[in-house]
Amino acid sequence: MGRYDLEYPKEATNTVKRLNDRGVYALESIHRIVNSCQILHVSFNTPSQEFPAILPMIGQMGSFERPSADLGDPLDLYLHGYVSSRIMNLGRAGSEGEEAKGMPVCVAASHVDGLVLAISSFSHSYNYRSAVLFGHATLVTDEAEKMYAMELITDSVVPDRWRHTRLPPTNAELQSTGILKVRIASGSAKVRAGQAHDDKSDMENEPVRDSVWTGVLPIHQTMSEPVASPYNRVDVPGYISDFANEFNGDNKQQSLDAAKDQ
Amino acid sequence: MGRYDLEYPKEATNTVKRLNDRGVYALESIHRIVNSCQILHVSFNTPSQEFPAILPMIGQMGSFERPSADLGDPLDLYLHGYVSSRIMNLGRAGSEGEEAKGMPVCVAASHVDGLVLAISSFSHSYNYRSAVLFGHATLVTDEAEKMYAMELITDSVVPDRWRHTRLPPTNAELQSTGILKVRIASGSAKVRAGQAHDDKSDMENEPVRDSVWTGVLPIHQTMSEPVASPYNRVDVPGYISDFANEFNGDNKQQSLDAAKDQ
């Protein structure tokens, strides 16, 4: 399309310093890592303790204002949770008042693509894709936006699942589920792909070259055959078996591609 | 052995409130989740920004004072990182001074064992095992403890790898690698296993029972065939192929067991 690729500006918060050639700032790359991650780790501070807290949550980037936005566009992060949980209460408190811009959060999304074994343990590494986003979380109160986010998040678990479930949601369901919206302030990713590397002194050390196996053990997430519930009456539908096949094929290919020498 | 199982005491910091029947406080269960997790998410605060930060790190629980300690004993968490990285500098600063007990951190370890699909999207869930630890991180300065931690962490990536690499470490390697030790203040885990469940009204809704597939899509991490580096000269050794087979078998079984109705 010839359009430039948007990037998060490099600032003190998000700049990758260590091994900075692995740093990635393109919105599309970062958002893709987040949206393909089944568990996001969300950290936030609470008034009552010295430790930050981390919650594993399910979430997805999207745009309620412009649902057709693609991964390379500025997006919000929607997180799903129980309405009276601590993080929802903090998000609610952060949404109130004149100057409320929300609760500061950091969100991490990480994939392991392989274990990289070198001659020296100190040259061992992982192939990985890892993103962090910083932003301000508020509780979604608009009913239409809440429905948009719930459909977005459900379909992120299994594509097309939402319209195959019992609809519409009941009032009790809508009232018991909270959605946090994170307005992104900054973000970055760090990606490592490729083969093992060793220092010159180890490469020239014939005895260790002849005795230490070096290479990559590719790792990916796999889905086994679906296990029906005791009350299920339906054959596994095509949208689920297609998803399982693509999930397995794509994940395996990603880990094998990462294991190639680059 | 008849010995009681140690638990982290329930306090404000670590108590699981939402769906509290899923809460786990036993040291052994929590430490097992942490030690089998390939990436730990470590959050900490920095003086210069309002957001907590999260770093994906490699780490392992152990006891330098008593290396024979088992998973159910009080243990420290050792984290591996580059010596001049931000978190290492903060850990160093937190170790200095008379009253220094270290930098407050929260560490999360999460495994996804399956996607749980119910009639209502609001009854969807994951099968998962998730642990959080709270503690104070300091930089390890004792050389023997540093070596202990490096071997512990290397062998957590591939069992028995350390003694099959080039040894001993060089001075440059030792100086460029930092180890953070987290003294655990508190921790808990949350575990969900089992089949889909739906509310009574959906269970009695014949048309949706006849149309919505319900059950679990089991998910586990798989290792593909090892990919040798361009400079490798050695056949894949038994300790690596055995590890890959066990990794695949154990992970798959875990996800299938979790998918059973409980």
Image (cartoon, coloured by chain):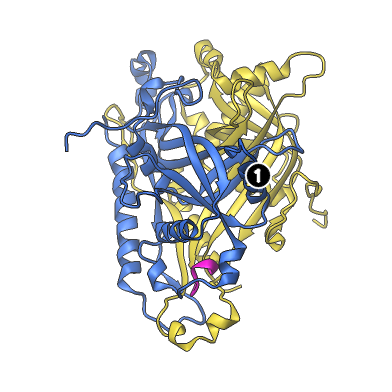
Chain colours: A yellow, B blue
The amino acid pointed to by label 1 is: Val
Pinpoint residue B253: horizontal percent, then vertical percent. Answer: 28, 47
A119 part of magenta stretch? yes
Tell me which residue sits at (35%, 24%) in the image. Answer: B197
Quarter the N terminus of chain B occupies: top left
A234 part of magenta stretch? no
Q: In which quarter of the image is residue B241?
A: bottom left
Residue A36 in sight from this viewpoint: no
Residue A59 drawn above or below residue A9 = above
Pinpoint residue A251: horizontal percent, then vertical percent. Answer: 49, 55
Chain assignment, label 1: A
- Report the side of B248 relative to A59 (left or right): left
Q: What element does badge 1 sit on? A: strand
Mark 1 lies on residue: A132
Residue B193 in sight from this viewpoint: yes
Q: In which quarter of the image is residue B42?
A: top right
Q: In which quarter of the image is residue B164?
A: bottom left
Tell me which residue sits at (73%, 14%) in the image. Answer: A96
Most extreme residue toward the left, as rendered? B1
Residue B66 drawn above or below residue B188 = below
Quarter the C terminus of chain B occupies: top left
Tell me which residue sits at (31%, 44%) in the image. Answer: B254
Q: What span is in magenta? A: A117-123
Pinpoint residue B139: horizontal percent, then vertical percent. Answer: 57, 50
How many marks are shown on the rendered structure?
A: 1
Q: How crowded is mark 1: few (under 14 residues within 10 Å), some or many (20 or more)?
A: many
